[in-house]
Amino acid sequence: MAIDFLAWAVTAAFLVPAILLAAKGSSLLVEYAILLYVINREIRRIVDWSQGSFNPFSPIVLIPLIATCLLLLPFFSRFGSLHATSKKIFILFFLAIGYGTFVGLACNGMAAVYAASEYLSPVALMGFAATAPVGEWTADRWMKSAGWITAGACLYGWFQYLTVPPWDAYWVQRVGFVGYLGKLAPTEMTVFSTFAERGPCASFLSLALIPIVVCRRWRLFLGWPEALLILSTIVLTLVRTGLVLVGVSILIHPLVNRGRGALRIVVLVAVIVLAGFVGLDRMPNADRINGRLSTFRDIKEDESFQGRVGIANDGLKLAISNPVGYGIGSSGLGGRLNTGSVSNSNALIGDNGYFEVLTALGLPGGLLLAGGFVLLWCHLSTCCRFGLLDDYLGLARTFFVAFLVGMLAGNFFCGLTVMWVAFGQALSPRMLEKLMLIDEPFLEIPATV
């Protein structure tokens, strides 16, 4: 009972500020929700370690989900301020999640409720950012605050790499990740920082790095050292997808934004390549890191790549065999809550976001979700085609491509990252106001209004 009491007490302690911020309608709820998403698993590990007992279903994991669901309330109250296309996008997202939740309740029980909050959280963050009556200064504050949170997670990642804190080692042992995350020794363990695992860690860090490298306005006073800190931590996770996302974003940003920032991108690539040559061999236990990154040279022979090909094939068969879907809550932690087993989490499709979403939402939900993203891209492209120049619009277009690539390796539709803030800003009424101010004769506002 003492363990449960402590876990619930910690949960309540972190949720009270979120409830107060939501009640006041404060824009600080965005930063607090992202902070809770980043640190909650580390808090859980410390609590479990301090009590000497591992609880795979600790209520602490609910902290960021409940906090971000609080974003839904002001979003719903301001929904009418959105223009027509933005409303359609959110309605399609909600219909997709609603369908998956309905099937999930029938097939997976209460696990669907937990898993549905995972799907709703990023939509809530995007909706809050789209409808909040704030200016660009506040939006920039959200982005920079996320940068500070990311820098903190990276510093802890290096601390974890060099020392292996006992609470992290305890968790690795209890979940059976010894070997998968390396050895429990300094510079021998793979970094997962404060996150649930190394995959989500690399995903969050890579998405946080993208706005820092493509636009000066979102950099902290540390500038390039901050970018290199994040990049080095991504390397310590040994997750190549994170590096791929950063590389794709650097290359695609000027292409989808009419060449904006092309010179800066060239300089950036040169800096990163130079830093890689100079710094990689000087990192602690560089041989292990180089061995992992060297697989880029012959990716087809890599076991991880071959495994993902197999997952894609099995996931396709699974989706075809049940077009109705297995419902939200059939995989991930929701699946474990349903089965009461840590191992039975439908890991078959966990490394492919497309099939994880498709098997959860089924063909109807998948089509609804895809329709929402198609409308989102059409909106971004329409604004760009009519000559609207906006950093958030350009960043959203870059994030859209990164999202499509990232979904090949994991479910990027879940997780609270700056990507959803950028999408929300691109869908805000402010974009429409800027579009209407463009001084061009005979300009007709497109169907996006």
Image (tube, rainbow, N blue to C red):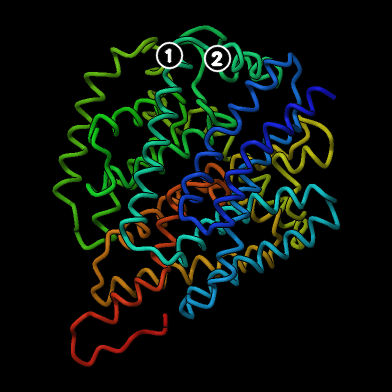
Residue 151 location in percent, x, y? 38, 31
Residue 16 location in percent, x, y? 63, 43
Relative depth, front residue between 153 and 33 = 33
Q: Is residue 371 above or below residue 13?
A: below
Residues marked 2 and 1 touching at CB (< 8 Å): yes
Q: Could you say whether the residue bearing mark 2 is in a helix, strand or loop? A: loop
Residue type at the position of mark 1: Arg
Q: CA distance from mark 2 to mark 1?
A: 10 Å
Q: Viewed as shown, does residue 223 lie left or right of 285?
A: left
Q: Could you say whether the residue bearing mark 1 is in a helix, strand or loop? A: helix
**Residue that mark 1 sits on:** 288
Going from the N terminus, do you reach mark 2 or mark 1 first? Answer: 2
Q: Which mark is residue 93?
A: none
Most distant residue in the top direction = 185
**Residue that mark 2 sits on:** 182
Residue type at the position of mark 2: Gly
Residue drawn at 54 percent across, 57 percent down: 24
Q: Viewed as shown, does residue 3 lie left or right of 69?
A: right
Residue 239 location in percent, x, y? 47, 30
- Quadrant the C terminus occupies: bottom left
